[in-house]
Amino acid sequence: MVDTAITNGRVVTERAVTDADVGITDGRITAITAPGTLHTTATDVIDAAGRLVLPGFIDSHVHVNLELGEYTTTDEMSDLTRAAAHGGVTTVIPFAVPDRDESPLAALGRRREEAAGDAYVDYSFHGCLTEATETSLAQVPELIDRGATSIKAFMVYEDRLMLDNGELRDVMDRTADAGGTMLVHAEDNAIIGRLIERHREQGDMAYDAHADTHPPVSETAAMWTVSELVAESECPTLLVHASARRTEEIATHAERNDLPLAVETCPHYLALTDEVYGRDDGEAFVCSPPVRSNEHREALMEMVSSSRVAVVNSDHCGYTMSQKRRHRDDITRMPNGLPGVETTGPVLHTEAVTSGAASIRQFVRLMSTNVAKLFGLYPEKGTIAVGSDADIVIFDPDEEWTIEPESLHMATDYSPFQGRSVTGRAETVLVRGERVVDGGLVGSPTVGEYCHRTPESAGRHYREL
Ligand code: URP
Ligand code: ZN
Ligand code: ZN
């Protein structure tokens, strides 16, 4: 007997595509059998004929309550995770960014308290160091012991989040020594700063200057620095939100030199181009790094095809259109970031799988397996196997629909993909066997549980992506 049987679906994992039934008991996968064999033994049967049965998506790059300048992102954990569930995401890993005068450990404790009982899907947190004082560096081992085995650092956002190269080096060394991993926002603040000053002198500070002031070289120069620091420290590191063509050379260098350095990109870099900054609503697309020209977009898609991009995450940042508009004439005061936790699955499926650029197994790796491997959640999460958590998305790969803000659930009033036709949709979403979405929302904010990641699992699978 099993509690739930998902029958007649096409089960996709990182390794195989198989027609099979999946049995679930007490929140875990307990049987994978020939199609049409499990329905008689289950209390609850989900007919997945004509559908894909995928491991739940994991989004390890989402911002909740991020305060930057005069803005704080709009979502609470319940908003973020409700929207995530609608998009097939069954685990999120936001950042425990310390407030001013708050320690990294206090930030983690506060985030955990805020999230308890307020999450529709499972969650963990990345630790975050916004300064490299002896006090904050000394907290790295305890962050890792408390389950935040990955530490985020920013090379930009001066006066709030930024570490300089010396500070970053210390944080990476300390994280490596404690058995943790890093995520780095790599952009060169000095290059960007001088370009902004030049634009300011010319009175050219509106949103359409964003891409010019954040050129590809500011990103790849900083990435090379990170690459060197990884070579020295051997700290497993994810370069987040890669947008530039020459990231490919950094990924190839890492591969040839056996560096534990992986690359993330986001759907907006794969589906949009810098033409958006010429539009009247161009401020809606301001994010760092910016969306780039088609040449960069194509190169990133090539990196997806060749598996040099390891993961695709949303970099979800919930701001409203009025927040984006308020300082549209001053890029230094505009909130950076785009909402997207709900749309990554359909946008990537359309751009990568429907287009023929990647296989459905690659899609599963990018959206789930590799994220679980990078962040110490595999094989409990990130796959469909006996013994794994029953985090499952029943996905219709053929459904064509148009993204419109009214049909989404994020705490904002726009989507960077609005008006775009996509193929593929999450129909039914289970978190540890419990239905959270089934046509519409059926779960509650008490479903989500904290995933305590261990130092033993952190970085273990970094070289197997
Ligand atoms: O523009 C972005 N990406 N905003 C969110 C914060 C960050 O840098 O990840
Ligand atoms: Zn960033
Ligand atoms: Zn981000």
Image (cartoon, rainbow, N blue to C red):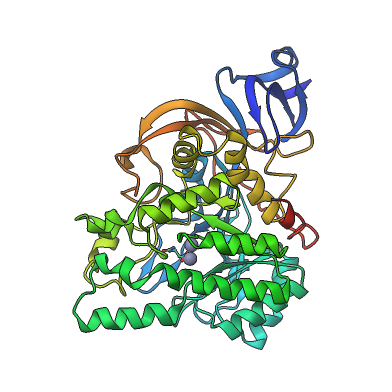
- Taking the view exactly as shown, the residue that stands out farthest to the bottom is 134
Q: Quadrant of the N terminus?
A: top right
Closest to the observer, 148 or 175: 175
Q: Residue at x 34, y 53 (%)?
A: 273
Percent of width and height locating residue 158: 44, 80
Q: Is residue 150 above or below residue 121?
A: below
Image quadrant where residue 360 sits: top right
Q: Is residue 428 above or below residue 202?
A: above
Q: Is residue 35 above or below residue 221?
A: above
Residue 91 visible in the picture: yes
Q: Residue at x 81, y 60 (%)?
A: 456
Percent of width and height locating residue 40: 73, 12
Q: Is residue 161 left or right of residue 272?
A: right
Closest to the observer, 365 or 125: 365
Image quadrant where residue 405 sits: top left
Percent of width and height locating residue 356: 50, 34
Image quadrant where residue 74 sits: bottom left
Q: Residue at x 52, y 62 (%)?
A: 247
Percent of width and height locating residue 296: 42, 56
